[in-house]
Image (cartoon, rainbow, N blue to C red):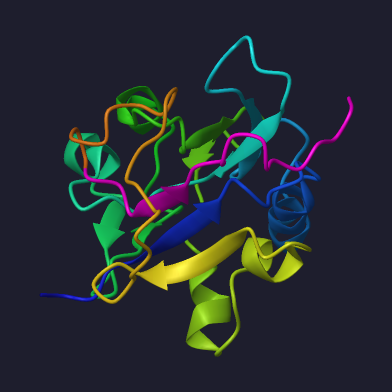
Amino acid sequence: MPKQLGFHHNMSVCIGCKACQMACKNEYGLEAEVNWRRVYPFREDPGAPERNFMSVACNHCESPECVRVCPVGAYTKREDGIVEQNHDKCIGCRLCTMACPYGATRYSPSHRKASKCELCKTRLDGGLEPACVAACPTHALTKIELDTFKDPAAVASVPGFPNSNITNPSIRFTPPVAGKQYRRDA
């Protein structure tokens, strides 16, 4: 089985601080309207008083829709499972942004091209953690290898996350435990 890198997000300890989102934005100098990683409020039960958060970016899917639909072959999958994009090939057609069920590929109006998280491949190749992972103060976000990742509480999908059977995303979630969530008043 080939190596498949991905993310694990422990929703029970995420405080919604958006340090991961800002670290990604700062690492790559992303413009205001482009966020490769996004943090969303998560509430499995709308009547529950607790608030939790979901941090998502590109899921480096086993069967990535961006690779399948790109008419110019701008997307490829590395041996470690990272889905990368050749920005020079991108023609800005936005087919990838429409095809990704997770909204991971973002279109830049100023550059007139699409772009996405590449799991900080340059940092990884240099022995560093992805910027988002390194910035997380509660260690809620980690880089994983799917074939060796073992967490009995982790699941492939949570309510509100698109159907994981579509592309087999390389993200695992540890859902919040009722009554044990961190709270952060908005």
Q: Residue furthest right?
A: 185
Quarter of the image with the C terminus in it? top right
Let me know if residue 140 appears in the view: yes
Q: Which residue is painted at 39% across and 62% down in the image?
A: 6
Q: Residue furthest front?
A: 179
Question: How many marks can you see?
Answer: 0
* Residue in the foreground of this view, choosing between 156 and 180: 180
Q: At which x and y percent is residue 134? A: 69, 71
Q: At which x and y percent is residue 38? A: 63, 38
Instruction: Please report the bounds of the magenta region as a residue range.
Output: 168-186
55 lies left or right of 88: right
Q: Which residue is painted at 59% across and 70% down in the image?
A: 130
Let me know if residue 72 appears in the view: no
* Residue in the foreground of this view, choosing between 149 and 163: 149
Quarter of the image with the N terminus in it? bottom left
Q: At which x and y percent is residue 29? A: 75, 54
**Magenta region includes residue 175:** yes
Magenta stretch, main secondary structure class: loop
Q: Is residue 99 above or below residue 117?
A: above
Q: Which residue is painted at 71% across and 54% down in the image?
A: 20
* Residue in the foreground of this view, choosing between 41 and 4: 41
**Magenta region includes residue 154:** no
88 lies left or right of 149: right
Q: At which x and y percent is residue 156? A: 32, 45
53 lies left or right of 72: right
Q: Residue furthest top?
A: 47
Q: Residue furthest left?
A: 1
108 lies left or right of 102: right
Q: Is residue 58 above or below residue 80?
A: above
